[in-house]
Image: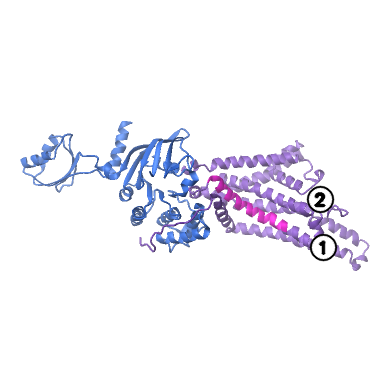
Chain colours: A blue, B purple
Amino acid sequence: MFIELTNITRWFGTQQALIDVTLALPPGRIGLLGPNGAGKSTLMKILLGLLPPSSGSGRVLDHDLASAGVALRRVIGYMPEADALVPGMQGAEYVALAGELYGMARKQALRRAHEVLAYLDLGEARYRKLEEYSTGMKQRLKLAQALVHDPPVLLLDEPTSGMDPAGREAMLDLLLKLGKEHGKSILLSTHLLGDVDKVCDAVVILHQGRILCQGPVQQLCQSRHDRYKLQIQGEPLGFLDDLRLEGVQIIHDNGRGDYRMRVPAGWTTHAFFKLAQVHNVVLRGLQADNEDLEELFHRVIEENRAQI
Amino acid sequence: MPNLLQYRAWQGTFHSEWWSVWPIARVALGTLVSRWLFRIVGVFSLKLFLMFFFGAYLLAWFETQASAPQLGNFADAGRMIRGIRRAMQILNGSQDTFQYFFAYQGAIVVVMLSLVGSLVVGNDFTHKSLVFYLAKPINRWQYLAGKGLAVFVVVQIMTTLPALVLFAQHAFDDWDYLLNIHYFTDTVDGKGPAGILLLFAILGYGTLLSVFLSIILVATASWARRTIPLIMVWLSLFFFMRILANLLVDGLRYDPRWRLIDLWNNLTMLGQGMLGFASDDIQPKFRPELWEASLVLFGVSALCLIYLNLRTRGVEIVR
């Protein structure tokens, strides 16, 4: 198991940052989603062994969180959200320093730093001072220092923060490649749903310190069978009125015959065809409308608010 | 993003986490040395050392002149030479030499550390580099040891190392200085130890200065973070407290223990003790006991370490 947490709670004074967090995640690319202040960074620090939980227990790659701080951090590459740069250093020196801090010999660390920087397309900039790096370059540099010792696990805190669209796409492609082709387990903490959608195959949604939902993205998004996409040809008014009378909710109408609908419980797709025939409308397309990640996220947050 | 190289796995062995102390110290040292303020103060330090170094030769030259026949014609030549010699006694390689040397060099070190010391640790808080270090397989004590080691090395290079050079200079001049611990007491007006005892005293005094200044710099720099606040903190600790202690003890005739608030005085008193000064010769005259000074320095160091322990917890990283 990649991450196993049982009833993890973390207090900061009177503020409870994490509340009974229980997780069981297999190796893979996992997105940690949540709005600002949800407790993502606190959870990351606990997984790194930097912060002890106030209560609860957990393991990351079979390392106990309570006792294996140093050993645990050796198998993890952590990319912080903050710049976390050492002013005055050159890119290659910075990444090599990270390697040395992981325990690599100086020569090996330097050689590996050059390799990783070249891989991340920072080869040209490796002798530049860190203060001269652009935001996108800094993000890649932070990834380089996390990768320098070739860890099996990457914890990435907002890796695309502040990047332009092209840089962001490139970063996400890179992360996907690292996960898919090089077998890295990735925990990607972000509030950008698109990042998770592109890179991750599982998601954990955290809100106000609680885990609201966890599991494979596809499975979570397919878990709703009450919505359909329809494409119709012909005069739709009567057809739509009858659908509404039957309790169907029209969620989206693009004005060109494409509709998204939420159907009541017990609805069968046969009813669409029956009503279409009555109103002389041609059903050109009918398919289950799976919830996308954004909708899943908002639904889960809303449901949580409603419960509170 | 075009890849110039494919990602390559790395296979190798990792050193123990204590190996990471040196890279941390090396980077901190590099940061210090790269500042022009460091170099300027370093030049002053070098100049002071050279004054002591060549002053010893000047003293030796005067001594040879005392017996020179042309000076013998002057009635007061002997008295004149003795007067000069007394004035230059601090250059003869005795406990006085090293007491003055450590006091002057130490003062320069304190000025330098207050000017550039914030870069050693303060930057890690200001630029959030602390998370870069602590997210690696090291614990906070190894991080602090690395930072402290950088300051230790700087203080050693500016005090103990030149003091050892001065010691070697005198040893090369007269091997008896190195071999005979009673070298000075055997002479008419000399005092204090020589030889191996003096060598250990120099190492002890240098280590005391280095360790204490390292701890207090790392603690105050992690609190003050920036240069100006750090200068103000060090001014208070090493200058205003000294004035206050002098005012209380010498001016208002308070108990000499009030001098314990002057940390620099505590350091120099202990240094004099290490250099073998007799109890009556230790300055200042109205002063607390050496053990009391040791206790205060130990207590301040312990408080600094407790503060650093709290300051570098993970909770700081989250905020």
> As displayed, is residue A120 above or below residue A12?
below
On the image, the x and y values in percent for residue A305 come to 32, 34
Task: Please state which of the two labelled residues, at mark 1 or mark 2, is closer to the viewer.
Answer: 2
Mark 1 lies on residue: B60
Earlier along the polypeptide chain: callout 1 or callout 2? 1
Badge 2: residue crowd in 10 Å (few <14, some 14–19, many ≥20): some
Q: Is residue A51 left or right of residue A287?
A: right
Quadrant position of residue A246: top left
SS majority, magenta: helix
The answer to if B146 sits in the magenta stretch is: yes
On the image, the x and y values in percent for residue A173 come to 33, 55
On the image, the x and y values in percent for residue B147 come to 58, 50
Q: Secondary structure under badge 2?
A: loop
| Quadrant (top left/top right/bottom left/bottom right) for the C terminus of chain A | top left
Q: Nearer the viewer, residue B11 or A93?
A: B11
On the image, the x and y values in percent for residue B241 come to 68, 42
Residue furthest bottom as drawn: B70
* Amino acid type, callout 2: Gly
Q: Nearer the viewer, residue A250 or A193?
A: A193
* Amino acid type, callout 1: Ala
Which contiguous range is marked in magenta? B139-164
Contact between labelled residues 2 and 1, with CB atoms less than 8 Å apart: no
Q: Nearer the viewer, residue B35 or A262?
A: A262
Mark 2 lies on residue: B192
Tell me if residue B182 can be seen. yes
Badge 1: residue crowd in 10 Å (few <14, some 14–19, many ≥20): some
Q: Label for residue A28? A: none
- The answer to whether dots 1 and 2 both sit on one chain is yes
User: How many angstroms separate mark 1 from mark 2 (CA)?
Assistant: 20 Å
